[in-house]
Amino acid sequence: MHQPTYSLSDFNFDLPQELIAQTPLSKRSASRLLQVAGSTLIDSNFEDLVQQLSKDDVLVFNDTRVLKARFFGIKNTGGKVEVLVERVLFNNPEQHSVLAQIRASKSPAIGSTIRLADAFEVEVGERAGEFYTLHFPSDVFDLLEAYGKLPLPPYIEHAADDYDETRYQTVYSKVPGAVAAPTAGLHFDEALLEQCRVKGVQFAYVTLHVGAGTFQPVRHEDLSQHDMHSEWYSVPEETLAAVKKAQAAGRDVIAVGTTSLRALESASQSGQLEAGNANTRLFITPGYCFKTVTRLVTNFHLPKSTLLMLVSAFAGYDEIRAAYQHAIAQKYRFFSYGDAMLLTNNVKKES
């Protein structure tokens, strides 16, 4: 069957401002869950997810932890700057350097210094595309934790407070490195995880450090012209074993979030999942053949975003458009602090 060609405008939709969730619910698992399987839409609660899982299915979680990656500072010339750390450069054994976005009225000069949080100075290194290399005076993770601020998404209008510092992390976050949360995982609390364990659902983990590029809009109407941002991921041997066991038993491999899916599919480009770590620029649009993931837990995504294109590739373009129209009519809460969907892969594999 001929695959239609999609353009950027095909992924636009009108979203009432009041449906953009500004704060999280007090109970993580109290959010709503829209189940999408082909043209079937079922309104349910997130706690109902357990009923949709079977013994020996494997849930794959992204265990990245969000860094306190935002700083306000002053250049040595006196100008004010805002710095958002994009990633810690792990090729530096002392972990003293980062790639960062810098907002300033005038670009800082290479070799100049910026005083951050009125606490320490960083040296500006070479440009790398839209980013700058910044050299910190000591361990980056220590300085981020001590002086940084949590970087909430641009559509959340309040500054991060102590409550956000807890709620904008998953309960299983472990490996620091992300500048945005893998938000599908925010719905899981310890009680729900225990219900899944009791049912015999298997847990596995990947790490994908979500970058600020996840919020960057697609600017080209021709999707093939989009320059996909790069993110670092790791798939451990234990996860490979868990996935293979589930596949051999005919069970589902359920990615918790598009970041888990991107890690699994990036590591499956040979045709089957392989363990290891790498940087990925995988851009999933309708027509992509999924190799490992069979179901997906995900939040509702921004218009014209790469993530909306990904879920359309997974569940079907028409099916996602219908699901989003339904969600808007039923006043589901959108984006990072919003409600969730459970999607079943509705695109036939190539023979």
Image (spheres, rainbow, N blue to C red):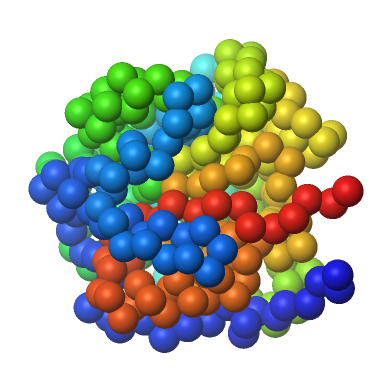
* Quadrant in the rendering for residue 24: bottom left
Q: Residue at x 14, y 44 (%)?
A: 27
Quarter of the figure that contains the N terminus: bottom right
187 or 8, nearer to the observer: 187
Image location (x, y in percent) of residue 283: 69, 56
Left or right: 146 as drawn, with respect to 136: left
Up/down of 94 relative to 329, above or below: above
156 or 40, nearer to the observer: 40
Q: Is residue 220 visible?
A: yes
Q: Residue at x 41, y 57 (%)?
A: 35
Q: Residue at x 38, y 32 (%)?
A: 65
Q: Is residue 236 visible?
A: no
264 or 254, nearer to the observer: 254
281 or 86, nearer to the observer: 281
Image location (x, y in percent) of residue 192: 25, 32
Image location (x, y in percent) of residue 255: 52, 40
Q: How many marks are shown on the rendered structure?
A: 0
Up/down of 72 relative to 133, above or below: below
Left or right: 261 as drawn, with respect to 44: right
Q: Residue at x 64, y 36 (%)?
A: 264
Up/down of 57 relative to 178, above or below: above
Image location (x, y in percent) of residue 258: 52, 48
